[in-house]
Amino acid sequence: MSEFISKKLLKEKAEKYGVMLDDKALERFDIYAKLLVEWNEKINLTAITDPEEIVIKHFVDSLTVFSAVEIPQRAKIIDVGTGAGFPGVAMLIARPDLDVTLLDSTNKKLNVIRDILENIGLEANVVHKRAEEAGQSKDYREVYDFATARAVSNLRDLSEYCIPFVKVGGTFISMKSAKADEEIEEGKKAISVLGGKIEAKKTLELETAGERTVILIKKISSTSNKYPRPSAKIAKNPIK
Ligand code: SAM
């Protein structure tokens, strides 16, 4: 059967970050890439449509999370602002044991995710809510082992969106490209106020795509009920 992406390339590059993909996972990534490009003709999901670039900049980039932190079997994870499923859907394909929630404020993107999940035969909780609303609901607040976010907001504001989801002892994983140090500096007060502590910063070279940084923020105490605030307040009066 013909392939849309090079499964060989994906398998090799994922292995470099310690992620072993079996034939089933590679097949699922192939279907995912094909549907992503098809849907992208109807709604704007990504500027990256070349199959090789999808492999590196979306799939392998998402999988680098596993090289930065050990994620136990059946861990409960929320991907905040998942968009077309990065890193959440990619993590689920690599690790179908995970209990993944995919949250986004744009339902048309979540409809694409629903279609992709159906076609690859995997289940996740798909939640159409704003992060700052879900973070105040007992269904989502402080119930996750991990929260992930890639390309959603600056670390300071993103921490207010994401840290409330994480239970004490859990970890917020923030995926950044350039300027991670500046964002850490700008965000460290907010991280502490929200009950977090920067545990590690792992910088890696993503093939030809440049530097990436995975920031691990440990939740060391419960977040005050005051947070997260409505997004207008976060924007107007950030924690600093
Ligand atoms: N994480 C994906 C990725 O790396 O490809 C998508 C990144 S996209 C630039 C940002 C996404 O975050 C969009 O899908 C947007 O709808 C979502 N988003 C932004 N603010 C949000 C909020 N307050 N609550 C939930 N989703 C939000």
Image (cartoon, rainbow, N blue to C red):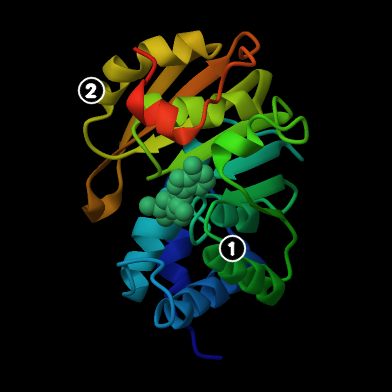
Question: What is the residue that sits farthest to the bottom in this orientation?
Answer: 1
Quarter in which the N terminus is drawn: bottom right
Left or right: 28 as drawn, with respect to 212:
right
Element type at mark 2: helix
Residue 27 quadrant: bottom right
| 120, 221: nearer the viewer | 221
Residue highlighted by disc 1: 110
- Please name which of the two marks, 1 or 2, marks the residue nearer to the observer: 1
Q: At x 56% / y 11%, what residue is drawn? A: 195
Residue highlighted by disc 2: 182
Label whose residue precedes the other's in the sequence (1 or 2): 1
Quarter in which the C terminus is drawn: top left
As shown in the figure, which amino acid type bears the numbered disc 2?
Glu
Q: At x 66% / y 50%, what residue is drawn? A: 95
Q: CA distance from mark 1 to mark 2?
A: 32 Å
| 215, 79: nearer the viewer | 79
